[in-house]
Image (cartoon, helix red, strand yellow):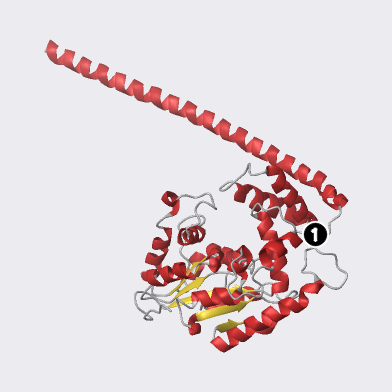
Amino acid sequence: MVDVAAGVGGGPVFLHVGLPKTGTTFLQRLLRENHELLAGHGVQYPVRGPGTMFQAAVELRGSYEYWGLTPERIDGTWQWLCDQARGFEGVTILGHELLAAATRPQVRRVAADLAGAELHVVVTARDLGRQIPAWWQEWVKDHHTSGFAETMDRQVLPGWDVETKKSAFWRSQDLVGVLDRWREAVPASRLHVVVAPPPGADAQELWRRFAEAVRIPAGADVGLGPRSNESLGVAEVALLRATNAALDGRLVQPHYGPVVKHWFAESVLSPRSSRRPMLPADWQGRVEEMTARWTSWIAETGVQVHGSLDELRPTVAGVGVPDPDAVADEDIAALAPRVVADLLVEVARLREEGNEARRELAVAEQQVRASRLWLRGRRVLGVVRRRMAALGHSSQ
């Protein structure tokens, strides 16, 4: 483990590393939208533009190509964040869920770059029964086309009984694996697990637990607002899978994320959610066994827990509930007219925005031409005046 001396070069730094699909977007939004209010309470969430934390995480992970970014565009973001942390005496909060899958060398780099700070690592976690279907949705949102059963066979089952889990799923969702890698940066006493509340709990309880972990004062009354629901039902996931197949790689990053994932999937499809996907009941024994191993490791290691480890007990579908791949063609087809209608309305809106932009551009061009004529007239008038002055002087 790479440890550091506490209290040197600024206040404590809390690095939130995920896990993905555990309310991370909700927490990041609250931190970003309230960063000025939090600063008044001695808590810093550094922001210098859209996507600051995301860009820093991509830089640390070296995953430029996957996200359609270039080193020239984002390199230096992580160093800027480190500089902000070193120069601040209060609490600094950094992080992004992409860091859940950080490798041990990447973890060691973070520890080295923040050497001298009292570094803490925060991991938000949710029960595997909800986490697996949520991760599958995110997998499809990231341009994949595989169904639930196929994804389980290729991503979840491989490595289930192996200590080192290497698939895309386990790299970011193996709770103990993530905690163990980040133990190279901090002692267990500075590793925090924030447990997401169970279904039906107060929607803001996650924020309260997170705020406790990262030492946000109780008096920092952030505007919580309602939590957005970006999850999809089984019919919507099926339609998105079919859309990804039809796109056939024609829309890639950095365009795929804003257009397909954030707009089409999370704005157009999510409001009309059908039956939500749930982990089939025959997985209950397996996920309960995995959860028991995780909770025992956490308790024995001395990791700080916010919430209750009992709340990690998996939630699975009841007996007889169809699996997530069981979607009738007519249910998918029923979505088409409404989705197409929304797309047409958006095209009309964008067309009007384009027309308005062209009108504004035409006015600006006319103003530029008028300004140029005015300046040309000023120059001509100046020349005439100088000549007249010279002639007047000569006549004397």
Does the image show residue 245?
A: yes
Residue plotted at (53% across, 63% down): 32
Q: Quadrant of the C terminus?
A: top left
- Give 85 or 249, whichever is nearer the viewer: 249
Q: Quadrant of the N terminus?
A: bottom left
- Give 36 or 244, whichever is nearer the viewer: 244
Q: Does residue 196 lie above or below 347 as drawn?
A: below
Count of numbered circles on the image? 1
Does the image show residue 219?
A: no
Q: Which residue is mark 1?
A: 325
Q: Quadrant of residue 382?
A: top left
Image coordinates of residue 85 in percent, x first then y, are: 40, 69
Residue plotted at (69% across, 48% down): 244
Residue plotted at (72% across, 80% down): 288
Give amino acid for label 1: Asp
* Left or right: 145, with 110 as reference point: right
Image coordinates of residue 198 in percent, x first then y, are: 71, 76
Q: Does residue 254 lie above or below 294 as drawn?
A: above
Q: Quadrant of residue 109?
A: bottom left
- Give 71 or 37, whichever is nearer the viewer: 71
| Circle 1 SS class | loop
